Image (cartoon, helix red, strand yellow):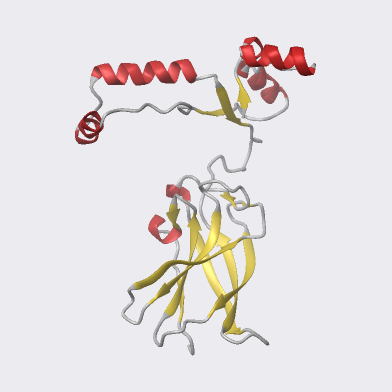
Amino acid sequence: MEPGPHHSQTAQSLAEMAQFKVIENDIVMADIAAAAQQGGLIVPQILVQLQIPWVVPFNRYQQWADSPALPESDAARLVAKLHRQLTDQQCFYLQKPGHASSVDSRRSHALAAKLQLQSASPAAGATGLADFRFRICNTGEATWLCRAGIPGQVNLGCQLLGPDDSVVQLDFARFPLESPYVAPGSAVKIAVRVKRPEVAGEYYWFDLVAEQIATFQQSGHCQPVDWHPGA
């Protein structure tokens, strides 16, 4: 994440260079792209995003939501705002060529996994707790972000369901994976400890979650694991 090609000429940069004797370089994406290719990387991918929100009245917002396309005047203004902000903050990705996935877990269509429960038992020396061991294999096309702290981070999730299969607690527990990322075709193991259900008939539903993106079950390419006490 870097500022744009005219960063060194902004008032803030000039003041910081004069006061603190620091260097505020311009970041020219053409130079970055050329250096990346020279170093054997693929052409950078750029995340284009609006940095400054646009506040609109409800009636106009509702008009946008109800229409198949934005009115021409609003669309032109939105494009103009995007164009002005395009190089204010450049977010770009540099990747190696070859078999490395260029898609990560922020893309729900590429999420897939095989979730295997290897063992489940009462926690030794701890009343009311249960220990679980899972093997998790990334069977999709996306590299999982596991320690990023951003939307798309993949965790093992646990829901608490009732005897009639109703959701008692949607986000009963979350467990981070130990690897910083999990590449397609790779597998990880995880051991977790969960508080046992207090109501007869309640049970656990384990699934992988790409935070703020989707559960893997929603992607249609993962079979969750349910566990009933005493099973």
Answer yes or no: is residue 65 visible.
yes
Q: Is residue 122 left or right of residue 55?
A: right
Q: Name the spot of residue 78 as percent of width and height, x first.
A: 35, 21
| Residue drawn at the location 80% of the way across and 16% of the way down | 21
| Residue drawn at the location 24% of the way across and 33% of the way down | 58
Q: Name the spot of residue 139 as percent of width and height, x first.
A: 53, 57
In the image shown, does 182 or 202 lie closer to the viewer?
202
| Number of residue marks | 0
Q: Is residue 73 left or right of residue 195?
A: left
Q: Quadrant of residue 35?
A: top right
Q: Is residue 86 left or right of residue 2?
A: left
Q: Quadrant of residue 119?
A: bottom right
| Residue drawn at the location 56% of the way across and 75% of the way down | 194
Q: Name the spot of residue 93 as percent of width and height, x first.
A: 60, 32
Q: Name the spot of residue 113 as percent of width and height, x first.
A: 51, 60
| Residue drawn at the location 55% of the way across and 46% of the way down | 150
